[in-house]
Each structure stands twice: as C-alpha cells, then as structure tokens.
Amino acid sequence: MIDKIHHIGIAVRSLDEALEFYRDTFGLHLHAQDTIEDQGVKAALLTIGQSEIELLEPTRPDSAVGRFLERVDGELEALKQKGVELVDQHPRRGIAGLICFLHPKASKGVLVELATPID
C-alpha cells in the first residue's frame, strides 16, 4: 500500500518565476536546486509537509519535460502513428488550454491528459 508521496513533478517554462511563485505565495522552502544535463532540465525541490514539489524547466527542446510544454497536436499525431488508443482525435479547448486524452486502456488504466497552455 502506498502511504506517502515523495514528490510531484511540475513542468514549468521558467524555473525562476515558478520558484518565486511557490515561495512567495505558499511559503514553501527550497530544499535543493540543480541542472541535470543528461535529462535536459533545471530542477528545484520545494518542501511541503512530508512531501516535495519538483519544478522542472527544460534546457533543450528534446528533453522529456520540454515535450509537455510543446503543442499537443504534434504529440497526438505521433501517438496515433504508434497505434495508441485515444479519447480525442483532435485537440480541444479545456481548462488547461488545448487538451486531448489518451484512453485509459492505452495507459494501464490511467487517464492521461496532454495539454498545451494557451498564452
């Protein structure tokens, strides 16, 4: 049984701006900060209770985190080409911006949402 979440990762466009927001708004304390070259990210861990929030800023376009900040239509097309079962065939407007969902059957029972914030 899972009884604790160590951390939750959040992809951000600007680590500095996100750090300022989480520190100033919620009073969270910075536990660690580093650039992880092989993953192509700048990361920061903020303590919240017994868990942490990890903020991740891509440092290059091919980083795994960078994909979450790109347009979903390109990613959706790539998933279609791989035969992944989808709920949405085209991105649509949602609360998180342009969104689309993978079918839970395709991701072992998890409803995965791809989102591109609308600037």
Image (cartoon, rainbow, N blue to C red):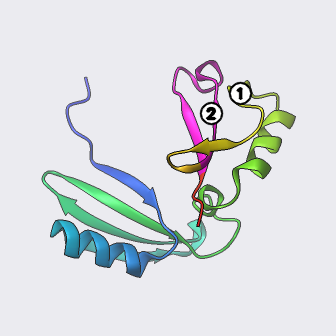
- Cα separation, mark 1 vs mark 2, equals 6 Å
Task: Assign a secondary structure to mark 1.
Answer: loop
Q: Earlier in the sequence, mark 1 or mark 2?
A: 1
Highlighted range, magenta: 98-115
Residue shown at the point (79%, 51%) measured from the top left: 74
Q: Residue at x 70, y 57 (%)?
A: 71
Q: Would you identify the image quadrant in which residue 53 lies?
A: bottom left
Q: Inspect this view and state whether residue 30 appears.
A: no
The kind of residue on which mark 1 rests is: Leu
For this orientation, the residue located farthest to the right is 81
Q: Which residue in the protein does label 2 denote? A: 101
At 62% from the left and 44% from the top, the residue drawn is 93
Residue 100 counted in the magenta span: yes
Circle number at residue 86: 1
Between residues 20 and 49, which one lies in front from this camera angle?
20
Q: Is residue 85 left or right of residue 55?
A: right
Task: Indicate the amino acid at tag 2.
Answer: Phe
Question: What is the quadrant of the C terminus in the image?
Answer: bottom right
